[in-house]
Amino acid sequence: MPEDNNRGGRGEGEGGERRYYAKPKFCQFCADKQITVDYKKVDLLRRFITDEGKIRPRRQTGTCARHQRVLAAAIKQARHIALLPFTGRLWDDNR
């Protein structure tokens, strides 16, 4: 039986066919001037944090650098006055 050099069971040429092309993201704050970033708008800020409570990077959200800085400051201010949690889970289910 001849030895198969292809790893993972794929045929020749199948490994590089699928490519992911990211959809271009745009800053929603630059596009719509009516939206303002405020630490009191918790529902808006929750879209920019992960389930663990971390601030999502610009690559994921598509915000520009200026609005990402403003957004990060608003999230940190909302955390400080307890409108947003510092962590994603309040209680550990495994206790």
Image: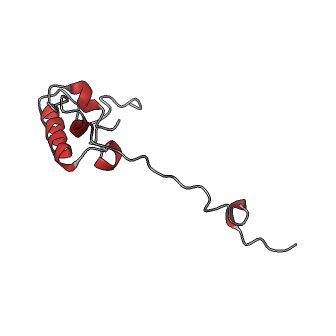
Q: Image height check: is 12 above or below 79?
A: below
Q: Position of residue 60 (x, y in %)?
A: 35, 45
Depth order, front residue of 64/53: 64
Q: Position of residue 61 (x, y in %)?
A: 32, 42
Name the quadrant containing residue 44: top left
Q: Image height check: is 25 above or below 94?
A: below
Name the quadrant containing residue 16: bottom right
- The quadrant the N terminus occupies is bottom right
Q: How many marks?
A: 0
Q: Is residue 54 left or right of residue 75?
A: right
What coloring was used for the rendering?
secondary structure
Q: Which residue occupies the extreme right position in the image?
A: 1
Q: Position of residue 77 (x, y in %)?
A: 12, 35
Depth order, front residue of 30/68: 30
- The residue lying at 18 percent from left, 28 percent from top is 34
- The quadrant the C terminus occupies is top left
Q: Is residue 8 left or right of residue 19?
A: right
- The residue lying at 62 percent from left, 59 percent from top is 17
- The residue lying at 44 percent from left, 49 percent from top is 22
Q: Image height check: is 69 above or below 37?
A: below
